[in-house]
Amino acid sequence: MEFRGGTYISQHSAGTINEAVKTWAYNLDTRNIQYLNNKTKQQLIKDLPQQLKEFSPTPIDNLKNIFFFSYQFKTGYVNINIVKTA
């Protein structure tokens, strides 16, 4: 995840790309991310089902199993790169 100049990496398992994004959001540790707190995280979790319905993670051209997803908070954008490994 990229957010306001920081890059934060985590790894999760899920059955689908959309489930992976949801799993990532539920497990997002906001303690070390400036301008991103638990209130903002809860808003993300609340908004995700509709966001994923309207804007599914996009496959990246010319790359296999790499996807991109973006979400806008009041405090900035979150850009999420997803790598499908299995």
Image (tube, grey):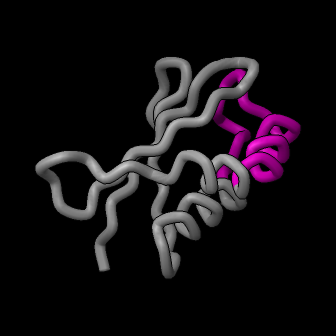
Q: Which residues are magenta?
A: 28-48
Q: Is residue 45 magenta?
A: yes
Could one spot residue 26 in this view of the protein?
yes
Residue sticking out furthest to the front: 54
Could one spot residue 8 in this view of the protein?
no
Taking the spot 66% from the left edge, 54% from the top edge, the residue there is: 25
Looking at the image, is 39 positioned above or below residue 35? below
Count of all numbered marks drawn on residues in the image: 0
The residue closer to the viewer here, 59 or 31, is: 59
The residue closer to the viewer here, 85 or 11, is: 85
What is the quadrant of the C terminus in the image?
Answer: bottom left
Looking at the image, is 51 positioned above or below residue 85? above
Taking the spot 66% from the left edge, 47% from the top edge, the residue there is: 51
Looking at the image, is 8 positioned above or below residue 84? above
Residue sticking out furthest to the right: 39
In this picture, residue 34 sits left or right of residue 40: left
Taking the spot 54% from the left edge, 19% from the top edge, the residue there is: 4
Q: Position of residue 58 (x, y in %)?
A: 38, 49
Looking at the image, is 53 positioned above or below residue 60? below
Q: Position of residue 60 (x, y in %)?
A: 25, 47
In this picture, residue 38 sits left or right of residue 75: right
Query: Based on the displayed image, in which of its 4 quarters is residue 7 positioned?
Result: top left
Query: Based on the displayed image, in which of its 4 quarters is residue 23 positioned?
Result: bottom right
In this picture, residue 19 sits left or right of residue 6: right
Taking the spot 50% from the left edge, 81% from the top edge, the residue there is: 15
Q: Is residue 11 magenta?
A: no
Q: Position of residue 33 (x, y in %)?
A: 64, 32
